Image (spheres, rainbow, N blue to C red):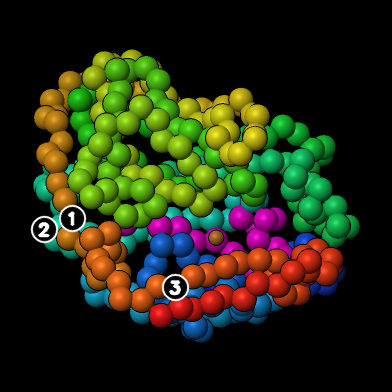
Amino acid sequence: MPTGLENALSATDNVDAGHNKVRLPNTTNLHTHGMHVSPRPPGDDVSLSIGPGAAFDYAYDVPADHMGGTHWYHPHHHGSVELSAGGGAAGLLIVEDEPGALPDAVREMVEVPLVLSWISPTALHELQSKFNGALWATSEPGDDFLLTNSQVAPTLAVDTNKWYRLRVVFVAADDRSPVLTVEGGDCELQLLAKDGVYLDEAPRRVERAPLTSGSRADLALRCATPGPARLRLGGNLAWQAKDERSFDALMLDVSGMALAPDLPRFRTERPCYLSDTRAETSDATLFLSVGDWGGGLCGKQPVRRVHPTILH
Ligand SMILES: [Cu+2]
């Protein structure tokens, strides 16, 4: 899978404020989520720095038995990730299923890719203010909003009683965890896969799909009643978070009269890297203790150091 990356951003304002700081806003690279590929160049190496005007030819060797699924990519240059991905630079990567891997009713569903980006102009404005304001120009920092495939609450026409496969990825600069729900139209959601991996046994009826930044959900959607309906995204399940804001993610215009039967239950064959290890036994025990990291955190000296211990 060859992928050419060209950095067309300007060298102006590309300030390096130092390691572990917001820095080099116009330096970039590419990182994938969910792909079982090499982390070495020219593969998924997050340590590459591709500066303004530079280019890099990524090449990913995707295993022949890679499981089909919904994955995603975004720039991952250390110091500029939040500004880039939080500003909407992200996209879906779909690994198609092998012929015969899915029941016909699942394979034939109309696909609806949905990249949901929670944009916080205030947070982005704060980040860009460190770079003389030449990057993220807003007349004034405004309220958060949600982009669905780069649009605000776009509309999708759907047939009554027909299945649609929503391939959802959620992207936000912070650690918020909102919930996706469907309102109106007597619509139902059936979960097929989480984070690009099919459920052991799918589908599973869900009332809501909790998402965290970077997570994916494959949801089958069927609406029974003509009229308006909508997908909503909001709330925040993150620890101690209190945020009741919610947004329309997708407006649904339900019409017509198809008649889709219930989805069959199915299991997919898993490649070796996703094998179920719960029933495996082990002849060795590994204890891993993690303490303060050796270099100290935020410039402070570590209080204590704990090393990993391996016991046989
Ligand atoms: Cu990431």
Outermost right residue? 132
Circle 3 sits on which residue? Answer: 286
> Which residue is depicted at the point 82% across and 57% down?
134
> Which residue is depicted at the point 40% across and 30% down?
208
Quarter in which the C terminus is drawn: bottom left
- Answer few, some or many: residues within 10 Å of disc 2's Cα (few below 14, many 20 plus, some between 14 and 19): few
Q: Is the residue 214 above or below the residue 248 in the image?
A: below
Is residue 104 visible in the rendered image? The answer is: yes
Q: Which of marks 2 and 1 is nearer the N terminus?
A: 2
| Residue 39 painted magenta | no
Q: Position of residue 47 (x, y in %)?
A: 61, 77
Q: Is the residue 172 above or below the residue 188 in the image?
A: below
Q: Where is residue 107 in the image (x, y as percent from the top left)?
A: 18, 49
The amino acid sitting under disc 2 is: Gly
Pointer 3 residue Cβ closer than 8 Å to ligand 1: no
The amino acid sitting under disc 1 is: Thr
Determine whether the residue tagged by mark 2 lies in a helix, strand or loop.
Answer: loop
Q: Quadrant of residue 74?
A: bottom right
Q: Is the residue 145 above or below the residue 76 in the image?
A: above
Relative to 31, is 283 on the left or the right? left
Q: Which of marks 3 and 2 is nearer the N terminus?
A: 2
Circle 2 sits on which residue? Answer: 100
> Which residue is depicted at the point 23% across and 23% down?
160
The amino acid sitting under disc 3 is: Leu
Circle 1 sits on which residue? Answer: 268
